[in-house]
Image (cartoon, rainbow, N blue to C red):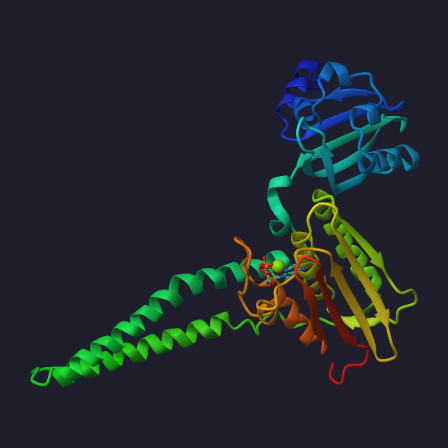
Amino acid sequence: MKPYRPDSDLFEIILRNLKEAVVFADVKGRIQVFNPVAVDLFRVKEKQALGEKFERVIPYKTIKKQFDSVYDTREGHYDIELAIHIPTSGEDEARLLRCSFHPIVDKKGMFLGCLATFADITEKGLLSREISQSKDLSTIGMLARWMAHEIRNPLSSLNINIELLRDELREELHLAQKEEIQSLLNFISYETLRLENNLKEFLDFNRLPPPKFEWVQLNEVLESVVRLLRPDAQMKNARIDVHFQRKMPPVKIDVSQMNLAISNLLINSIQAVSEKGEIRLLTRASKKNVFIIIQDNGVGISKEHLPRIFDFMFSTKPTGSGLGLSITKKIISDHHGEIAVKSEVNRGSTFRIRLPLHPKTN
Ligand SMILES: Nc1ncnc2c1ncn2[C@@H]1O[C@H](COP(=O)(O)OP(=O)(O)OP(=O)(O)O)[C@@H](O)[C@H]1O
Ligand SMILES: [Mg+2]
């Protein structure tokens, strides 16, 4: 049987129907394929793109770097998140892209060029993307929040109404079934109390998964968190600068929990800064401790809010769940460390974490 060979029409149909932008540049870096999603995304017509140099059509440094690297190393780079600012008639439009760069070789292993794909993930937002385990934990958090709203509020109004009924009953001196009603009321009140306690237990998130401690280089762990979040900062034209102390002693931590703790802080900073914001992540070590410091020049926290920011479900954001900092605090205390904050409205905030190198337990 003859092998089935799709004709070029079929390729074109496939390219047309893909939800990702697809760009292929030949061995000289000239674009040979530029599908309709690419046209929409990069705001360049197909005719103008074909035959042009890649960097002239897609003039973004961060993308060019990955693209060049494929030509230099003949190795692919996959699922990298990059932010770009597309110039429009008004303000720049920030888009967050998940990109892959594939080296293409023929049957004989000859390098033919680079195939790049771009998925627009701008709408997915910070927290819905996979940032270590935060996805799972924030799902639990969402559930807790939902429970709290759906059950806690009616429960408290139920309690108030039971008390009102009790008062009324007290005044009804001659009611025949007074005792029976009273005992029914007691039963209802006991059951609501039980519900309230169950709810409290459920919401009491002293029950994060138990930490798995391992010896690691803190700077490397932090570097990987920053790598994940940098595109989100770039979306706002903000920078995350790292100032790591060299030769840090190894630390014994639960890497995924620490990732989550630090990403919660960095996400808050990214949300707090405006255009041209600056976020700094520093590490320091002393004989007995390591310190992680996260600074931003964002909106800051008012004196009134400052004592409450680590509280469970305290949030000043319209769509915030108020779980970030409480989870971070819990993680740091599970590491026998401390977290402190200094902040000034319109100047910015500094969070400082101390982790003991030789905690008494574990
Ligand atoms: N870097 C910061 N700059 C300004 N305000 C901050 C900063 N970090 C925290 N806050 C304040 O503390 C509150 C609590 O933060 P937390 O991270 O616990 O919750 P959230 O960010 O509102 O919601 P979530 O993290 O669950 O999405 C925030 O709503 C905000 O008011
Ligand atoms: Mg937060």
Residue drawn at the location 75% of the way across and 46% of the way down: 276
Q: Residue at x 67, y 57 (%)?
A: 346
The x, y position of residue 205, in whole percent, is: 55, 71
Residue 160 position (above or below residue 221): below
> Picture quarter containing residue 110?
top right
Q: In this view of the protein, which residue sits in the foreground, 107 or 339? A: 339
Q: Residue 321: image x %, image y %?
A: 54, 59
Q: Nearer the viewer, residue 102 or 257?
A: 257
User: Residue 272: percent from the left, percent from the top?
Assistant: 66, 54
State which image quarter holds ligand 1.
bottom right
Residue name at image x 73 percent, y 22 percent: 34
Quadrant of the snapshot with the C terminus: bottom right
In-front residue for pair 216/11 = 216
* In this view, 294 is above or below 40: below
Residue 297 as seen in the image, left or right of residue 71:
left
Q: Which residue: 23% across, 76% down? A: 164
The relative height of residue 297 versus residue 116 in the rendered view (above or below) is below
Q: Which quadrant: the N terminus?
A: top right
In-front residue for pair 74/110? 74
Residue 261 falls left or right of residue 62 = left
How many numbered circles are shown?
A: 0
Task: Residue 97: give x, y in percent of width and height.
Answer: 70, 38
- Image quarter of residue 196: bottom left
- Quarter residue 83 falls in: top right
